[in-house]
Image: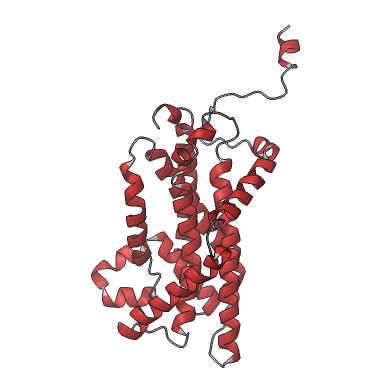
Amino acid sequence: MNNTQNDRWLYEITPHKNLISINFKEIWRYRDLLVLFVKRDIVTLYKQTILGPLWYFIQPLFTSVIFTLVFNNVAGVSTGTVPSFLFNLAGITAWNYFKACFTGTSNVFRGNVKIFGKVYFPRVITPLSITISNLFKFGIQFFIFIGFYLYFLVIGKEVSPNVYIVFMPVYIIMMALMGLGLGMIISAVTTKYRDLTVLVGFATSLLMYISAVPFPLSKAVEKLPEYAWAFEYNPITQIIEGFRFITLDYGTFTWGGFLYALVFSIAIFLIGLIIFNRTEKNFIDTV
C-alpha cells in the first residue's frame, strides 16, 4: 500500500539532512528557471537607465583613469614597464567580478523573501544565477581589457602574458567561489542582523585597498612592512596579483600563494553553502 502511494508522487520535497546538500538532479530539473534568473539579472539591471549596458564599459574605464591619476601620477606608484592604466584595468576587471558576486549574493534571502515564501525551488539557484550573470559582465569588461592590451602592443609597449595564462579559468573560478561563499554567509547572517547590510558596502571599499587592487603587492610590502601580513595573507590579494601576473607578466606569483587562495576559496564556498542550507529552512520566520 505504501509503495503504491509513493509511486503517485512525481517529486518529493524533503528537508536537507546533510550539512552540504546539493541535489544536482533537482538543479538540472530547474535549469530553465536558472536561465530565466540569469536573463533577469542581466536585462533588468540597466533597463531603465539612459546609457544602459554602456555602464559595463564606463565604470572600469573611469575607475582605471582615476587610479592612474591618483596612485601612479600623484603618489608615484611605479608599475614597471607595464602601462599604469593597463595595470589598473587588469586589477579592476578581476576585482569587479569578485565584488559583484559578493555584493549580489549577500542579500539573497532578504531580496527574494516574497518569492521564497510562496514558491518552492532549490534556493541555491538564486546565488548561482547571480554568479553566472556577473560572469557575463566580467566577459564584457575582460573584452575591454583585451582591447586596450592590443592597443598598447601596437604602440610598442612591453606587455605580454606568460605561460601561466593557462590558469586563467582557475582564477575566474576562485573569484566566483570566493564571492559566492562570502555572499551566502553574509546573506544568512543578515536575516537576523540587518545592520550588517549597511556595513557590506563600507567593508567592500576597504577590502579593495587591502587586496592591493590599485597598486602592486610588492609596493605595499615595501612601503608598509609592518602591515605586510595583511596583504600577503589576504587570499583576494593573491587572486588579484596572480591575475595581473598571468596577463601582464608583472607582479608577485608563488605556488604557495596560488594554492593558499585556491584552498581558501573552496573552503569559504563550502562553509557558505553549509550556512546557506541551514538558514533556508527557517529564515522566513526571522526576515
Say which residue appears at 55% left-offset and 43% top-offset. 126
Outermost residue on the bottom side: it is 156
In this rendering, the answer to whether 101 lies above or below 123 is below
Residue 71, image quadrant: bottom left
In depth, the one of 147 and 235 nearer the eye is 147
Q: How is the image coloured?
A: secondary structure
Lateral position of residue 193 relative to residue 14, left or right: left
In this rendering, the answer to whether 83 lies above or below 240 is below
Lateral position of residue 137 relative to residue 194, left or right: right
Is residue 258 among what the camera can see? no
In this rendering, the answer to whether 77 lies above or below 19 is below
Say which residue appears at 59% left-offset and 37% top-offset. 22
Give the image location of residue 167, x and y in percent.
Answer: 58, 67
Lateral position of residue 27 relative to residue 245, left or right: right
Give the image location of residue 189, x and y in percent.
Answer: 38, 39
In this rendering, the answer to whether 18 lies above or below 144 is above
Say which residue appears at 26% left-offset and 67% top-offset. 227
In depth, the one of 228 and 287 nearer the eye is 287
Is residue 18 among what the camera can see? yes
Say which residue appears at 45% left-offset and 33% top-offset. 279
Give the image location of residue 277, x and y in percent.
Answer: 50, 35
Count all numbered tags in the image, as a single digit: 0
Give the image location of residue 200, x and y in percent.
Answer: 36, 51
